[in-house]
Amino acid sequence: MKKLLLQTSAFVAAGLLANGAHAQTASTDQPIQMRLGGQYYTGAAAMISQDDQPGEAGYKRQPTGFQDYFLIRFMGSTTFSNGITAGVFTRLNAFSAPNGTVNTSNGFQSSNNTTIKDSYIYLKNAQSWGEVRIGDDSDVRRNDAVGANAGVTGDQNIGANSSDIYFSGSPVFNLTTLNLDGRGTKIVYYSPTIAGFHFGASYTPDKAGGHTNGPGNIGDNNGPTDNQTNGLTPSYLNNASAYNYWSLTTGWNGTVGPVKAAWTAGYSTASRKGACSSKVALGNDAAGTLGNPTDCLLTSTNNADPHVYNTGFQVNYGPWELGFDYELSQGIPGGLMSGYQQAIALKSNELINKNSDLNISYTVGAIRMGAEWSRGEFEGITGDLTNIKRAAINDVIQVGATYSVGPGVNIAGLIQQTLYDPNGAYVPNGSNFTPGNGGVPANNNVYAKSYNSTALIMETSFKW
């Protein structure tokens, strides 16, 4: 209901702007036109060689695997007589995942992998004042980033620098477009393009708040066990690690002779507040000693503000395409991704992660040949608190080709080498791992061990 009201309000406002600017009747405006789009990716891989001895990352893991990624887009827009466009965009992440339920304090809710990925309304006039969005969307730094769409497939949804279709076996994965605010409900502005330059800004009060997500999840929504009363603004004491996310981006695109080029740079940050493991009653502080509440342990350790910096460029010259994208993240709550546990960052010693991607392709007819090199450097990932700045390095190298079967339908074949180097990371409890059952050390730490693999990959994509 809330989103429907927001859409209705935006369309009414757009109509007022249109009539006010041109003193014309609504009959000159066009009704909303709805469109449907989407994309489906699927891939198969075989690890023809990998480190899979007891205690290593590949131990007892299936050497073959399949993955898929399915998105459906619902788009609607209308352009008024004064040139202003009002629209709505919704993207559904539609996986065929097993369905189930999870407990909430007010009952049960569905738990599956079919979710709304983006959902926002917008007003824009690209030639005069730009575009304004309100809703669930990635921050402007991530949306604007370029440099990751060359390589074998020309699409970051699959490849060596992707979180969607990605085969590796390494204990970590590389990604140059971290979504810091998790598509929280936000306000977004993109400027018009002037002499090739543009600017963007976005603000998100709460990473997960502002939208409903099933029974018992209203108001400050941070998971199925958090069910604050509807209408409350985000709480600093309820399961969220940061608030007040904001992002900036700028860039240039144009042509220099026969060369088409694009460049972007962006920055994102938030205010770190710590996180409570359970809901705190209204008006109360977090548990602590009498007269000395802990406020969820807001110490210098968990109050380090996160920062993300990104820059990239894309160059097209005839059949050649070259891209480069770089991202540095610092002080990310809980680490970059759920795939591993990163050591806690000290405020005076915040962990820094660096991800870069270099990609090139050459297209002749229906065949695109390409190569890609992705590198991730992760400080503190091995848990070595005595030398927390030492970074493990994860390199992924791909070469291959894509064949365009027809409009929107592609088949790709690749060979991939993954090289993970802990960079001399420590071994806990002395100089050796302690033996455990089945030959795997009881204090095993896969992040402190090197990993190599070679994979043969085939992928198919459909876009409409």
Image: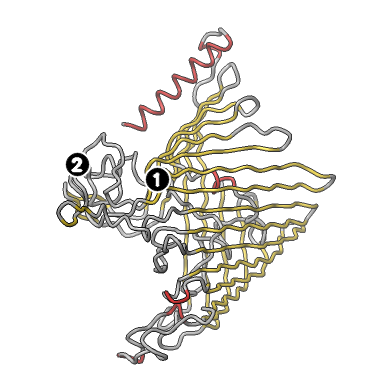
Give left or right: position of 19 versus 287: right
26 or 451, nearer to the observer: 451
Give left or right: position of 289 versus 55: left
Q: Are marks 2 and 1 in contact (CB under 8 Å)?
A: no
Q: Residue furthest left?
A: 290
Q: Using the numbered discs, state the Cα–Cα distance from disc 2 to disc 1 in whole angstroms.
A: 32 Å
Q: Residue furthest front?
A: 291
Q: Nearer the viewer, mark 2 or mark 1?
A: 2
Give the answer, above or below, for where 61 lies relative to 270.
below
Give the answer, above or below, for where 285 lies relative to 167.
above
58 or 271, nearer to the observer: 271
- Looking at the image, which residue is at 59% across and 43% down? 249
233 or 139, nearer to the observer: 233
x and y percentages locating residue 150 in the rendered image = 67, 57
Instruction: Quickly name the residue at label 1.
Output: 116
Identity, as a three-letter code, of the amino acid under mark 1: Ile
Mark 1 element type: strand
Quadrant of the rendering where the N terminus is positioned: top left
Identity, as a three-letter code, of the amino acid under mark 2: Gly
Mark 2 element type: loop
x and y percentages locating residue 435 in the rendered image = 34, 92
Asked which quadrant contains residue 276, the reply is bottom left
Give the answer, above or below, for where 237 lies relative to 12.
below
- Looking at the image, which residue is at 19% across and 55% down? 287
x and y percentages locating residue 139 in the rendered image = 50, 44
x and y percentages locating residue 119 in the rendered image = 43, 39
Instruction: Quickly name the residue at label 2.
Output: 283
Q: Bin the neighbour count of mark 2 within 10 Å (Cα to Cα): few under 14, some 14-19, many 20 and up.
A: few
Give the answer, above or below, for where 328 lies relative to 220.
below
For marks 2 and 1 on the same chain, the one whose residue lies earlier in the sequence: 1
Q: Bin the neighbour count of mark 1 within 10 Å (Cα to Cα): few under 14, some 14-19, many 20 and up.
A: some
- Looking at the image, which residue is at 70% across and 32% down? 194
